[in-house]
C-alpha cells in the first residue's frame, strides 16, 4: 500500500471511530429550557380553552401540535400519511327525560338528587333506611328488592390523596356497591356527610358529563343498580321507608378524539424497523366551575409538560438520530379514561411486535428539583428488568433524582401507576415505564398554568427521559419482558 492510500484508509478509520464514539452520547445540548418555555406558554394558553377531549378545542391544539411536530423534523406516522389517528369516543349521559319520585315528592335531578351511575333503570321499590352502617354489617339486613338509604361513612376511606373532596363520593360508592349489589338490593341512596356536602359542587360536573368509553371498553351503558346522592338536610325524605319510583334513561353518542403521531427514523438498516415509543397526552379538563375566579383548566403540568418535552426530544433526535426509530405518540382523551392510549395499543400504527418499549410521561414539571418517581420500576408493576436498569443508569449519568418509590407501591392511596397512558401498553405485553414528578396542590385546578411550571425541573425530567430513550434506541438487544408479568388491578 502506498503512503497516500495508507493515510486515506487511516483517515477513514479515524473518522468512523470518532463517529462511533460520538454517536453513543445523547445530544443533550439540543434540548433547551428556552424551547420548553416557549412551547409551554403556547400549548397551555387560554386560546385552547383547556383542551377538553372530544371538543373543537382538542382538535385545534392537535393541529397546533402537528405543525410543531413537522417543525421539529418528525415525519407523519398517523393515518393516511397524516399526523392524526382519529378514534370514536363514546359518551353516556343521564337523559333529561329521567325522573325520580320519593313518596309524593318529585325530585329535580342535579338539584335535589345526584345520579352517580349512568345506567338504565325503571322501577318502583320500597326504601330501606339504614342510617350509618358499614359494609360488613349489611348481610344481617334484609335488603333484597329494596333501595338502601344510608349515611356516607368515611371509615376506612384514605384521606391522604389529592382532590379528596372531589373523589370522595367515588370512594364511598366503591366501599359499598359490590356488597349491596350482591345482596340483591335494587339501588342505593347515599345521604351526604360533611365531606360529601362540600364535594357536591365538585362532583356535579363529573356526574352530569357522564361516562366515556372507546371500542372494546365501555362502548355501552353499564348494567347495574342505580346510585343516588341526597343532602343530609333532606334525610327525612328517605327516613320513613316510603317508596321510590324512578325512570332513569340514558343517551349514548359518539364524537371524534385523536392521537397525534410522528416519527424520526433510525439509522441502522435493521434496527430502524423497531421503535421506542415516547408517550404523553394532550387533553385536559376544559371549562369548569371557577376556582379563584378562573374557569379555564389549562393543564400546563397535566400534561402539556410531557408534550413540550417530546418536542424537545424530537429536535435532539432530528439532529442526531438513533439506531432504532422513535415513535412520538400524543394521546387524546387520557382524562376520559386513557381512551387514546387504549385505542393505539389496540390499533398501533406500526406492528405491535416492533415496539421495543414505551416511555410515558405525565406531570413532569413541578415539585422539588431533586425528586421524581419512576413508576413501573418496582414489583408488582415492573415488567422489564433491562428497561428499568436503562432508566436508572440514565439518571445516574446526569440528573441524579432521588426516587419517590412509595408512589410505585400497590398500597399507595393514589394508585398512580394505573392512571396514565403507559398502562394499556403494559397490559398488551410491551415493556413500559411512567416518568413523573407526581401530584401537587394545583392538580386539576385552573391554577395549573404555565407561570407555575418549574422549568428547571421540566428540563431535568426531559433530559432524563431523553437519556433513557437514547439507551433503549441504541442498545443491540431490546429490553425483555419479565416472564408471566401480570397486572392485578
Image (tube, rainbow, N blue to C red):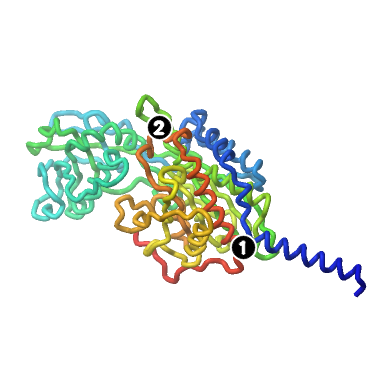
Mark 2 neighbour class, 10 Å CA radius: few under 14, some 14 to 19, many 20 or more: many
Q: CA distance from mark 2 to mark 1?
A: 41 Å
Residue 327, horizontal then vertical, whole percent: 59, 53
Residue 363 is drawn in which quadrant? top left
Residue 85, horizontal then vertical, whole percent: 56, 46
Q: Quadrant of the N terminus?
A: bottom right
Residue 116, horizontal then vertical, whole percent: 27, 40
At x 14%, y 30%, the residue is 233
**Where is mark 1, residue-wise?**
474
Instruction: Name the residue at the top extreme.
Output: 293
In the displayed structure image, the side of residue 337 where residue 246 appears, left or right: left
Residue 312, horizontal then vertical, whole percent: 59, 45
As rendered, which of 118 and 23 lies closer to the eye? 23
First-in-chain label (2 vs 1): 2
As rendered, which of 249 and 345 lies closer to the eye? 345
Residue 272 is drawn in which quadrant? bottom right
At x 7%, y 36%, the residue is 240
Residue 412 is drawn in which quadrant? bottom left
Tag 2–tag 1 contact (CB < 8 Å): no
**Where is mark 2, residue-wise?**
446
Secondary structure category for the residue under label 2 = loop
As rendered, which of 72 and 1 lies closer to the eye? 1
At x 66%, y 48%, the residue is 75
Q: Quadrant of the C terminus?
A: bottom left
Residue 80 in view (yes/no): no
In the displayed structure image, the side of residue 233 where residue 413 appears, left or right: right
Residue 433 in view (yes/no): yes
Instruction: Name the residue at the left extreme.
Output: 240
Secondary structure category for the residue under label 1 = helix
Mark 1 neighbour class, 10 Å CA radius: few under 14, some 14 to 19, many 20 or more: many
As rendered, which of 235 and 469 lies closer to the eye? 469
Amino acid at each position: 500500500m502506498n503512503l497516500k492510500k495508507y493515510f486515506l484508509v487511516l483517515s477513514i478509520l479515524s473518522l468512523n471511530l470518532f463517529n462511533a464514539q460520538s454517536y453513543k452520547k445523547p445530544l443533550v445540548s439540543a434540548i433547551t429550557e428556552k424551547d420548553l418555555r416557549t412551547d409551554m406558554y403556547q400549548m397551555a394558553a387560554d386560546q385552547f380553552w383547556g383542551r377538553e377531549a372530544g371538543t373543537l378545542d382538542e382538535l385545534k391544539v392537535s393541529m397546533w401540535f402537528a405543525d410543531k411536530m413537522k417543525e421539529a423534523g418528525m415525519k407523519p406516522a398517523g393515518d393516511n400519511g397524516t399526523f392524526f389517528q382519529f378514534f370514536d369516543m363514546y359518551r353516556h349521559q343521564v337523559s333529561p327525560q329521567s325522573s325520580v319520585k320519593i313518596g309524593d315528592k318529585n325530585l329535580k335531578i342535579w338539584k335535589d338528587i345526584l345520579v352517580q351511575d349512568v345506567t338504565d333503570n325503571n322501577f318502583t321499590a320500597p326504601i330501606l333506611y339504614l342510617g350509618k352502617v358499614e359494609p360488613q354489617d349489611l348481610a344481617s339486613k334484609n335488603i333484597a328488592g329494596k333501595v338502601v338509604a344510608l349515611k356516607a361513612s368515611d371509615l376506612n376511606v384514605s384521606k391522604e390523596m389529592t382532590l379528596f373532596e372531589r373523589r370522595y363520593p367515588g370512594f364511598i360508592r366503591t366501599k359499598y356497591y359490590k356488597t349491596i349489589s350482591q345482596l340483591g338490593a335494587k339501588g342505593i341512596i347515599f345521604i351526604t356527610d360533611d365531606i360529601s356536602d362540600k364535594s357536591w359542587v365538585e362532583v356535579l360536573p363529573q356526574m352530569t358529563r357522564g361516562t366515556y368509553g372507546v371500542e372494546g371498553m365501555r362502548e355501552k351503558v353499564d348494567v347495574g343498580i342505580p346510585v343516588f346522592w341526597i343532602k343530609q338536610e333532606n334525610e327525612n325524605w328517605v327516613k320513613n321507608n316510603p317508596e321510590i319510583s324512578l325512570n332513569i334513561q340514558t343517551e349514548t353518542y359518539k364524537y371524534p378524539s385523536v392521537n397525534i403521531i410522528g416519527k424520526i427514523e433510525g439509522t441502522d438498516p435493521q434496527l430502524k424497523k423497531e421503535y421506542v415509543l415516547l408517550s404523553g397526552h394532550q387533553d385536559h379538563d376544559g371549562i369548569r366551575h371557577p376556582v379563584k375566579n378562573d374557569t379555564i383548566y389549562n393543564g400546563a403540568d397535566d400534561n402539556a409538560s410531557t408534550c413540550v418535552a417530546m418536542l424537545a426530544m424530537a429536535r435532539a433526535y432530528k439532529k442526531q438520530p438513533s439506531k432504532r426509530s422513535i415513535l412520538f405518540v400524543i394521546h387524546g382523551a387520557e382524562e376520559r379514561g386513557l381512551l387514546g392510549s387504549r385505542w393505539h395499543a389496540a390499533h398501533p400504527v406500526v406492528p405491535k411486535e416492533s415496539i421495543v418499549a414505551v416511555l410515558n410521561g405525565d406531570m413532569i414539571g413541578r415539585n422539588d428539583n431533586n425528586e421524581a418517581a419512576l413508576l413501573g420500576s418496582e414489583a408488582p408493576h415492573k415488567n422489564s428488568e433491562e428497561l428499568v436498569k436503562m432508566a436508572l443508569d440514565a439518571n445516574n449519568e446526569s440528573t441524579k433524582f432521588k426516587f419517590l418509590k412509595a408512589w410505585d407501591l400497590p398500597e399507595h392511596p393514589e394508585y398512580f401507576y394505573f392512571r396514565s397512558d403507559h398502562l394499556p401498553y403494559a397490559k398488551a405485553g410491551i415493556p413500559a415505564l411512567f416518568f413523573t414528578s407526581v401530584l401537587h396542590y394545583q392538580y386539576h385546578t385552573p391554577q395549573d398554568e404555565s407561570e407555575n411550571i418549574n422549568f428547571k425541573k421540566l428540563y431535568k425530567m426531559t433530559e432524563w427521559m431523553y437519556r433513557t430513550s437514547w439507551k433503549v434506541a441504541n442498545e443491540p438487544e431490546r429490553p425483555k419482558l419479565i416472564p408471566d408479568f401480570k397486572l392485578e388491578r
